Image (spheres, rainbow, N blue to C red):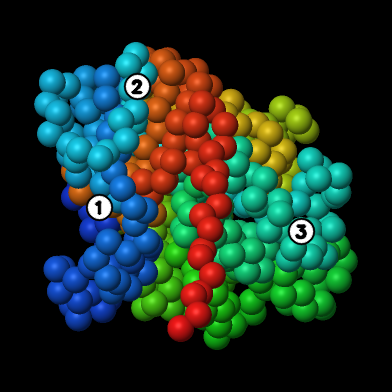
Amino acid sequence: MTGWISRLMLAAALIATPALAQDQGPEARPLHKRDKWLPPSVPTSDDVLRIPAPAGYNAPKGSFVLVGGRLFDGTGAAARPATIVVEGKTITAVLKPDDRNWPKDAIVYDVTGKTVMPGLIDLHSHLTFLNSEDGANIYSSANLSGVESVMRGVKRMAVYLESGVTSVRDVGSHGDAPFVLKRLQASGELPGPRIFAAGQLITMTGGHGGVHAFGPGYPELGNGNPNAMVRIASGPDEWREAVRIQFAKGADLIKLASEYSQAEISAAVDEAHSLGLPVTVDSETDYIDMAIKAGVDSIEHPLPRSDAAIALMAKKGIASVPTLVAYRVIMRGSGGYFGSTSRRFELNERTIENMAAKLRRAGVKMGIGLDVVALAGTGYLPGSYIDELETFNRIGFTKTEALVAATKTGAEIIHMGDRLGTIERGKLADIIVVDGNPDEDFNALRKVTTAFVNGRLMLQDGRIYRPAHEEVPLPTRK
Ligand SMILES: [Zn+2]
């Protein structure tokens, strides 16, 4: 084949890619191999595993309506005046402004002049990460008590809510802490975003993040600390077992990190998919090729990869969470990127933005994840979220498209697109109210006044809302 013909065919393939990616997004991927056993009419849990559950389980009592606001529904449609009706945990109607067809006993919130929109999603958090904010260096992370991990998570969950984030995908936290936090949030006992947790990050001896398993200089200690945020695995069988351990704790997804052999990552991804868990990976260069071959569902960070790898990501519906703001913070702090995975490539603020622009042009599904928890806790919120949105805007997303990436696409990347990410009838009520028009100016997200998660009021007037304790009457004498 002559050169110009093959170039022409390549160009045609690249042009065709975005449509293909739409059809074969993460949700079209055959994640749940055993779905054939579950009729679609059976109600299931509101997490990634979709275990059969009674209809309306975990729904708060009562109903409420948001009247007088402009609705940005997250579907990509322009904002419009609308009334939103929520019953229990579910959005039951989106009404025209003059329609008052809602339950008589509903609580009415007047949101005149404000924007109602789906809660933001942060796809890359580490709720329990220990960093300088906590007066420690990263090495003490390996020797952290579970109690301390949970307390750190509680503090950060509040900041996420104040910043309008109603779901976080936790891609590596200490021991069982993320699962304790997830359970308490889901039951309404603890205000905070919905948590989708990976449990421990899995890597090889000496791999990225491995130091969080055993501290510096003592790799022979391996997985000796059950509260470590990283699990070391050697060989395909141990990678499978590491996946099973996170599954046993209640994982919603699996997080892997470079480096690994092809056999190791293929075993881990196969095991996760057999269990119905999506896989994301922190990876670079040749390790991205291996991750794609293994069939991962998403790839974190803006690290280098070939154009062929980008085309394959688009074709196979592998999403990207570029976490650009984290790398910007690192580069501004240390004049470059000198992390454990940076030994064979150069990285700067220009190359990471070029990488993100290439991914967008190829039609790769892209979501918003910050990863700034690993740098300064939640101190950088909400500015870091706004900065990531602005970068998405700069690399070619319209402002509306950037907010759709933050909501609808984020939900799709978690495999929750049918329940979260937009304000539509039947969706779970994760809703924020913003004083301003974030679809015109992202800085309005500095003024999130109200947040509901799963139909529960959790933020009011910009402050965490906790309902008063409800007394349980003592049993009466028979
Ligand atoms: Zn991270």
Q: Which residue is mark 2?
A: 111
- Sequence order check: which comes first, mark 2 or mark 1? 2
Q: Is residue 415 above or below residue 464?
A: below
| Quarter occupied by residue 71 | top left
Choose mark 2 or mark 1, whichever is in front: 2
Residue shown at 41% from the left, 15% from the top: 436
The one nearer the camera, 463 or 300, is: 463
Choose mark 3 or mark 1, whichever is in front: 3
Q: Which residue is mark 1?
A: 418
| Ligand 1 is within 8 Å of the C-beta of the residue at disc 1 | no
- Sequence order check: which comes first, mark 3 or mark 1? 3
| Quarter occupied by residue 450 | top left
Q: Residues within 10 Å of mark 1 (few under 14, many from 20)?
A: some
The reply to whether residue 126 is visible in this rendering is yes
Q: Is residue 202 above or below residue 350?
A: below
Alpha carbon distance from label 3 to label 1? 35 Å
Alpha carbon distance from label 2 to label 1? 26 Å
Cβ–Cβ below 8 Å for labels 2 and 1? no
Residue 422 lies left or right of residue 376; in this view the side is left
Q: Residues within 10 Å of mark 2 (few under 14, many from 20)?
A: many
- Secondary structure of residue under mark 3: helix
Residue shown at 43% from the left, 78% from the top: 271
Q: Position of residue 327 (x, y in %)?
A: 63, 36
Q: Is residue 331 above or below residue 192?
A: above
Q: Position of residue 466 (x, y in %)?
A: 55, 43
Instruction: Look at label 1 and name its amino acid.
Output: Asp
Residue shown at 27% from the left, 34% from the top: 65
Instruction: Look at label 2 and name its amino acid.
Output: Val
Instruction: Look at label 3 and name its amino acid.
Output: Glu
- Secondary structure of residue under mark 2: loop
Q: Residues within 10 Å of mark 3 (few under 14, many from 20)?
A: some
